[in-house]
Structures are given as C-alpha cells and as structure tokens.
Amino acid sequence: HADLDQAAKAILTENDQGGYTIPTKGLYPYQWNWDSVFVALGFAEFDQDRAWQEIEMLFQGQWRDGMVPHILFRKDDPSYFPGPGVWGTDGGPIPSSGHSQPPVAASVVHSLVEADRTGKALERAKALLPKLMAWHRWYLAYRDPKNLGVIAVIHPWESGRDNLPDWDEALRAVEVKDIGPYERKDTSHVDPAMRPHKEDYDRYLSIVAACRKVGWDPEKVAETCPFFVADPGVTFIFLRANRDLLALAEKLGMSAEADEIRGWIAAMEKGSRTLWNDEVKAHVAFDERRGKQTDGISSASFLALYAGLHDPQTLGALQGHFDRIAERVEYLMPSYDPDHRSYEPLRYWRGPVWAMINYMIAKGFAEAGDAVRAERLRADTARLIETGGFAEYFSPETGAGAGGGSFSWTSAIWLTWAS
Ligand code: DGY
C-alpha cells in the first residue's frame, strides 16, 4: 500500500493552497466546508499542525451570526459557477456562499484531540470551542426554528448530497425565477451523465436568488426559503457532532456549555424519531413545507448508528437493509437504495459510493458492536480506491471512479481509515 499512501499524500499536498485545501482542481477550486474538515483527518496522519490549520482557516470564514459557509471564495476562479457575484452575501469576513454544509467539524476536532502527538491539541480545541458552539446554536435557531429536534437544509447543496432523490419532489415545487441566462462550468470538467440535470440547476439557482432577495437574513431565510427539508444526513451528523462537542467541553471543564449541549442532544434524540418511516423501516427526509416524508433509503439512513441511535429496532433494520443491498451491488454503500426507482449508479448522489460516508457509517456499526459490517465497509472502500483511484465517488456496481479525479477527501479517508 506504500504507493497508494504516497499518492494520497501527494494529492493533499497538490491541492493545498497554503493552509487550506481545495477538493479537486478545476471542478471545485475553493475551500469547501466538509471537504476541508475530512481533509484534516488525512493531514493528521503525517502533519498534525497542518490538520489543525485546515479547520482554523475554515473558521476564519465564520459569519457574524455563527454560520460557517459551505464555500469560502478566497480568490476569484472563473472555472467555477456560481461564484461570489451570484451569491451576493455579506455575512462574514471572507466572500462566501450563503448557506452551510454538514457540521462534521466538532467530531473531527475531537478525533484530532484523541490522536494528538503535538501536546498542543487541547489548547487549539479550546480556541475553536466558542466558534463551534456559535455554529451549532445557529443550526438550532435557523435550521430547526420550530424545535422539532431535526435539522433542515434550505438548499440541496447545504446537505452536501446535491441531487439526492430525497430532494426531487420538494425541488420540483420551487418556482424557477430570477435566474437569467447562465453557463454551468461543472459539466465542462465532468461527464454530464455523472452530474445533476439542468432542471435541477435552474432550481438550485432559483433558491439562491430567493435567499439573496431577503439579504441572506437567517430568520427570513428560515421563514421564506422555498426549500426547507429535514435531512437525516445533517441531522445525524449534527447529533454526533454534539456528542463529540460535549466530550470536548467536559475535557476542557466548560460546564455551562456542557449542560447546554446535553439539552440539544436530548431534544434531537427525541426529534429524530419523526424521520423514521415505518414502511421502509429507516430514517428518511421530511419536507417541512409540505409535511411529507420521502420513501427511499439513502446512505445517510445508516448514519443513525453514527449518531448513537442503536436501539435494537434501528440496528436490526439497518443490518437487514445492509445485507439486502450487499446482494444487489458489488461495493457498499450506494448513496441510494438500488431497489428504489430513482437509483442511478453513476449520477453523483443517486447511487454512487462516497468514501467519507462509508467512514462514518462504519464508525456507527463498530460502535453499535457490529465489527463485521464495519470491516466490510472498510474493505470495500479500499477495493474501490484500488480499482477506481482517488475519485470523487465510485460506481457501486463496477467500482469505476466517477466525478472529479485526484480528490482530496477520498485521499484523506484512505490515509486515516481505509488503507
Ligand atoms: C457543486 O457545485 O456541485 C457543489 O456540490 C456545490 O457545493
């Protein structure tokens, strides 16, 4: 594996822009939120100082209201659309997009503290803690304004799982307006068959236009955004992040913060039951505007375990789905159920396997006491990278690499876990 280790490190080093890392050249030329955070796990394997720096630079872009944006546009790059001009934001010190992305940062900060070899980790975690608290408070205030105990996304991009079938119906209900003519750049870097359709992009941009109209004011966005869907992915990642944040607060002796976080965890443990779909026997998305659940199992359904929800009913149902899906595809875990009508093995979030999702699902299975399925996910991820290279995502059927190449988070997940 020495050659793949070297290649993974070389990708991180090449995508390093001097303290922060881009996901891949061309397709994604800026700092992306959850990409960066996973990348820190990769750097931590050979340069822990650099790992901390990645996260610290992400938080340099934190907005005054606490939000940490999904993209930081530190410099203009014409190879990406939509750039800072389209977003029209003014919420923070660095030009950025107007919404967030899955909050994995507290969990990764916790991992960096646990793996520390520098003796400086607790000090660095302490400096980040108030920022993490502010971001988590922002999530609760503006992505769960009705205190349901689940986290909504105001845009498919905020979920990080852009063209997931779970968004289809809610997205079709978004009126296409205020977008003018535009030119996509993504399909000049990647085969259009692996990317979202134009009908999706029209609506992605219409949501941006609607939020820009209310000045990205978080309260108004929560009230008026045409898209507002509770996401099992963000909800479970956030619940897990709260547990890790609590562990950090306890370690640092911050008892007021610890009490506050305990309240969040209790509310979310209860609230996440509203995402349970008793017909499909898994957690699904819930369109808050229309009061409607979706009917498909996505790879995020398995993150219930990662969120610490491993009661026998949930664990048993997920083990059953795992084994059923394992009969259908060669490589786990497809981003959408291969038995669902919307499954497409190569189109981005409608079927392909993503390495960092496998990492989180496996952690959940291992913590629930299921070391066998956890190891299957690790071995499949390793085989995918051996077969398809350090691709953005992979076909669950053939293992072919898809989307962008020389991808940072795939390299990071190799280094920290899959190798
Ligand atoms: C894109 O441009 O496709 C990104 O996924 C948005 O975050």
Image (cartoon, rainbow, N blue to C red):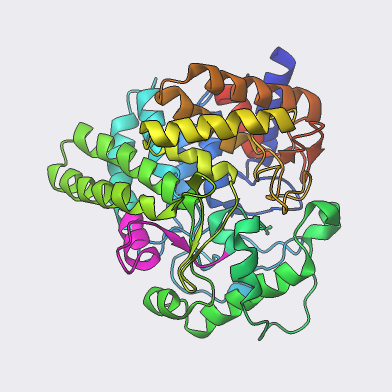
The N terminus - image quarter: top right
- Camera sees residue 108: no
Q: Is residue 371 above or below residue 215?
A: above
Comparing 161 with 217, the one in front is 161
Which residue lies at the image location 53% right of the left edge and 85% below the top edge? 213
- Counting the numbered discs, the total is 0
Comparing 232 with 183, the one in front is 232
Answer whether residue 312 is magenta in the image.
Answer: no
Q: Is residue 83 above or below residue 173?
A: above
Which residue lies at the image location 74% right of the left edge and 47% below the top edge? 25
Which residue lies at the image location 40% right of the left edge and 35% below the top edge? 313
The C terminus - image quarter: top right
- Camera sees residue 135: yes
Comparing 350 with 71, the one in front is 350
298 left or right of 113 in image: right
Residue 58 x %, y %: 48, 50
Q: Quadrant of residue 411?
A: top right
Residue 210 x %, y %: 56, 81
Which residue lies at the image location 40% right of the left edge and 22% below the top edge? 115
Residue 201 x %, y %: 72, 69
User: Which residues fall within the magenta stretch?
Assistant: 135-155
Q: Is residue 146 above or below residue 33?
A: below
306 left or right of 156 in image: left
Residue 138 x %, y %: 34, 62
Answer whether residue 149 is magenta in the image.
Answer: yes
220 left or right of 416 in image: left
Toward the front, the furthest residue is 279
Which quadrant of the figure shows ligand 1? bottom right
